[in-house]
Amino acid sequence: MFRGKRYKDSAKLIEKSKAYDTEEAIDLVIKTAKAKFDETVEAHIKLGVDSRHADQQVRGAIVLPHGTGKTAKVLVFAKGDKIKDAESAGADYAGGEELVTKITSENWFDFDVVVATPDMMGVVGRLGKVLGPKGLMPSPKAGTVTPDVEKAVKEIKAGKIEYRLDKTNIIHCPIGKVSFGKEKLTENFLALMSAVIKAKPAAAKGQYLRSVSVASTMGPGVKVNGARITD
């Protein structure tokens, strides 16, 4: 893969084989973020589980102490007064069948999170094939299937993020923007790590945290010493 001069210069500041303490790792991510825009900082957490087994799934949601630096666009599937509740809480879109039609016929995806009331899941289920691959399908575990749409929308707008395993048993999550600074990014990172550690499945055997790293959008990854992260 081609790497530009900025990336190569940044990479020189990092010892590839070293796992850094959390604050030092975050500090390096900030120093090596050289892009001309406010880069997003992501955590990448490889777990010692097998996501093919239902009893080893790791999935949940957390409101980061300082948000993500991005206001998510929220789509809510609901009926009657619940639509008004969602809109008053700040939902960008709220409705029922007509939104299903818009998504299927117009290939419309101008939203980041989908929330649904339980009585709408029969309708939303028809969108499984298009929402699922994009990671947009509502889930009770993530708090996005709920009768309390007002609370769900407010939490998402406040910086609630969902964490879930990909096919290689890695969780990828934004923890804020470079402009947040070391202190806020560290607090967000530790809040996420605490949630992931607490979500350890009973069926998981051996080392749970296999590897942890943080990186900015355009910068190199920095390994974090997982043994030094406390929940």
Image (tube, rainbow, N blue to C red):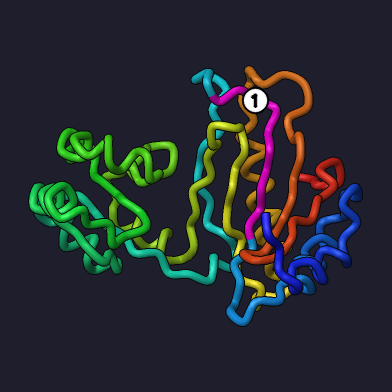
Residue furthest to the bottom in view is 36
In the displayed structure image, the side of residue 68 where residue 179 appears, left or right: right
In the rendered image, which quarter is residue 32 located in? bottom right
Indicate the amino acid at tag 1. Val
**Quarter placement of the C terminus:** top right
Name the residue at 26% across, 66% down. 92
Q: Position of residue 21 (x, y in %)?
A: 87, 55
Which secondary structure type mostly characterizes the magenta part of the structure? Answer: strand
Is residue 89 rendered magenta in the image? no
Whole-percent x and y of residue 109?
27, 57
Q: Quadrant of the N terminus?
A: bottom right
Q: Quadrant of residue 142?
A: top left
The residue at the point 55 percent across, 25 percent down is 51
Q: Is residue 93 visible?
A: yes
Above or below for 227 versus 86: above
Q: Which residue is mark 1?
A: 49
Does the image show residue 183? no
Secondary structure category for the residue under label 1: loop
Q: Is residue 139 above or below residue 216?
A: above
Q: Most extreme residue toward the front, as rendered?
A: 2
Count of number-bearing discs = 1
Please give left or right for residue 43 compared with residue 77 in the image.
right
Relative to 178, does residue 221 appear above or below in the rendering? above
Crowd tier of the residue under label 1, counting other residues whose Cα lies within 10 Å: few below 14, some 14–19, many 20 or above:
many
User: Residue at 70% of width from left, 59% of height from top?
Assistant: 215
Instruction: Answer with left or right where residue 17 lies relative to residue 177.
Output: right
Q: Position of residue 79 (x, y in %)?
A: 12, 50
- Give percent across and percent down for residue 3: 71, 63
The relative height of residue 101 versus residue 13 in the rendered view (above or below) is: above
For the magenta stretch, what is the residue range? Answer: 42-51
